[in-house]
Image (spheres, rainbow, N blue to C red):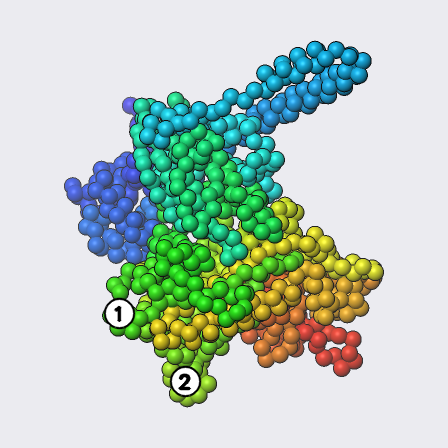
Amino acid sequence: MTRQRPWPPSPPPSPRLRFLAAAPTDSGAGMARLSPGCGAAAPQVDTGKYVRYTPEQVEALERVYNDCPKPTSLRRQQIIRDCPILSNIEPKQIKVWFQNRRCREKQRKESSRMQTVNRKLTAMNKLLMEENDRLQKQLSRLIFEKEAATKSLKTHIHNASAATTDTSCDSVVTSGQHHQQQNAIVPRPQRDANNPAGLLAIAEETMAEFLSKATGTAVEWVQMVGMKPGPDSIGIIAVSHNCIGVAARACGLVSLEPTKVAEILKDRPSWYRDCRCVEILHVFPTGNGGTIELIYMQTYAPTTLAAPRDFWTLRYTSCLEDGSLVICERSLTQSTGGPSGPTTPNFIRAEVLPSGYLIRPCEGGGSMIHIVDHVDLDAWSVPEVLRPLYESPKILAQKMTIAALRHIRQIAHESSGEIPYGAGRQPAVLRTFSQRLSRGFNDALNGFPDDGWSLLSSDGAEDITITVNSSPNKLVGSHLSPSPLFSAIGGGILCAKASMLLQDVPPALLVRFLREHRSEWADPGVDAYSAASLRAGPYAVPGLRAGGFMGTPVILPLAHTLEHEEFLEVLRLEGHGFSHDEVLLARDMYLLQLCSGVDENASGACAQLVFAPIDESFADDAPLLPSGFRVIPLDTKTDMPSATRTLDLASSLEVGSAGALRGSSDAANTRSVLTIAFQFSFENHLRENVAAMARQYVRAVMASVQRVAMAIAPSRLGAQIQMKHPPGSPEAITLASWIGRSYRAHTGEEIRWSDTEDADSPLKLLWNHSDAILCCSLKPAPMFTFGNNAALDMLETTLVNLQDISLEAILDEEGRKALCSEFAKVMQQGFAYLPGGVCKSSMGRQASYDQAVAWKVLSDDVSGAPHCLAFMFVNWTFL
């Protein structure tokens, strides 16, 4: 009889197998260890002593996961106690389930992101192939025109030589008649405005011309510098070259459907900041399912030195056979064969040449957009110095074409839910604040009579213009009913405005300085007046408060656009009084501020700083009275240098007879127009006093801005920098040697240079070092005295403005604590290593660094007294 051997017991599963056994499947089920005494109520039992999660258990865990994806140990035990259905599951299995659930969620998000990137790259590849085909066609056309011109020139030379020997008059007359017959111009037939068939003919012709510009070679396009295609780029931007008027073209990808994109683009006042109003006068449906609209549009004047424009256009919306949407537009004039609308006083009629939007659906969702803006702004109607405002295609591209793409991308990003709310408000609400600030500033700047503005008598000087608005509904966006006080006493709004030309001042640099250094131009008394009038009520304006705003402004960021070309923020001015009674009355003042165009590399971009006083409540319908500055470049050159290059100390390190800053010659001879407008509320019996105060204040601000412009102009920066570290001077070279020698003496390591280099080499290497190196004074309030190129980039400032930044202002709380704890070590030992952290630039952006090194910089003084403190922020990057 054969004895049957028992099966050996199964070995316990390894931790790895146990983890896999407990891992949930794709359907959300998983395995759980069977607890003793579960009985019949337990889930299905597996042969490996593991149980599979039931659908009810998975549902319960999913509910917990939605609230808390990563529960703690105590939280997991509480889950088991609160859910009886999970009572047979061990806490360790619950932990494994949440780990796997987070892993699946991460994989799902990554897969979705990769699919989105793949769709973008596929669409961008298609776009680039079409762009390549268009360039090939343009090249073929240019070659053909060249050959035709060469052939015509040869024929002309041959005919000229034959004409000298041919005395027959008949041949000349006959050839002349034949030439006239070939070049006869067929007049364009007139269309009737009340005849839909005539308008449809104009619309179809407009669409054909627009498509030839968007995807063809009807206009010679030149790509703007810095606009490179990519999955996250704004798109391909090009401007016209040698065409009638000015034109700009853009191609980009967005994650919105074509119908939504068309709806956004038609709402022009929401994204075109210079658009005052759009009125649709007539709508005609077409037989092909499209619509024809007759539109009247008004645009603001960008400065007080020019008149606003208006347009009378036809807009045609249609759908192509491939499912693409086309929205094209052109002006109706006598030359185009269509009806032209009546003229409007104070406006100059401009012309929209065939323009529009081609919106094509992409596979997997989203849209591919082609935008063409082509206008003739009648540049000859303005002074010659201002004509670049209306003749530069780059300015048109920044104001209309790029603005449209950025607005669509911003809305698409907001729709994805990836933008955090600022100050507890949704992005759409914050975007409305930006629009109200810009629109209120434009309204005050233009002062249209139909809005209630009227010109106040001048004091004889023509530099400042004073306009008054006594309309109750002009409290810029206020939804409040007219105040009874206004009916009894009366009052309104007064605007003081002026414009002036600037030379050799980059607009972005000037606006950045005005934003960062408000105390250089603002009057605390005027700020107090604005705050007092706002607190007292819409129309009641008390006298000047004695308490001023003398503290350092605190910037509280609210929102910014995707490319950081526009910032919305709250500026808090700390109130201080000069006596005991004034201290009791002093209160903080708040300004809602919009800053845009601070990118020095954006060619043709307008830089603007607009602000309005608000109260502490900051309601969504709060009345806004915007004031501010606008700087527009007047030069059409594309090689305008950036502010960082004009302040590049490395260029000044070139030792030689010239000793000039690199980039100064590039930035020289650049012009821009600065426009200033300040608004004040008043009571009727104080109107003359407020007007005198406003006129005096704007003149003082203009004088301050002129001083600032002279100080930061590239042609004068050399003199400014030479006061501290002249180009190639012994002081600059000595400072670099002290920094490197002190670092080596304290740490025993080299940075990058040695004393054996050439005389100017340490200074060059210090400037070009990849890490941010700063020198700080040894004072109770340490201020920076020097920074290399990387440090200026990290702080987003210049050498001129660096001395106004304190060490405490750039460090966060953790950084200040670390420095205070190690300061004694720095003074005794000579150096200390500080942990990584976060610092803040002058623009409010955060930059992280892996480590910071602080050391004493020793001079050649025999006493051994430290000259200053040096800091090196290693591997810094913006967050």
Residue closest to the eye, 173 or 778: 173
The residue lying at 57 percent from left, 64 percent from top is 513
Q: Residue furthest front?
A: 169
Left or right: where 577 falls relative to 762: left
Closer to the chain start, of discs 2 and 1, is: 1
Of all residues shown, which one is farthest toward the bottom?
580
Residue 843, numbered circle: none
Local packing at callout 1 (Cα closer than 10 Å; few below 14, some 14-19, many 20+) is few
Residue 395 placement (x, y as % from top left): 54, 46
Residue 526 appears at what percent x and percent y? Answer: 45, 74
From the viewer's side, name the closer residue of 796 and 833: 796
Q: Dot 2, crowdedness within 10 Å: few (<14), some or many (≥20)?
A: some
The residue tagged 2 is: 582
Compared with 471, 88 (above or below) is: above
Say if residue 169 shows up in the picture.
yes
634 in relation to 732, above or below: above
Q: Position of residue 158 (x, y in %)?
A: 76, 16
Calculate the distance from the C-alpha at mark 2 to the C-alpha at mark 1. 32 Å
In the rendering, which numbered label is found on residue 487?
Answer: 1
- Left/right placement of residue 778 relative to residue 6 reads right
Q: Position of residue 417 (x, y in %)?
A: 36, 47
Q: Amino acid at mark 1?
A: Ser
Q: Specify whether residue 412 is in view.
A: no
Question: Residue visible at 28% across and 70% down?
Answer: 486
Q: Amino acid at mark 2?
A: Glu
Along the line of sight, the residue nearer the viewer: 37 or 610? 610
| Image quadrant containing the N terminus | top left
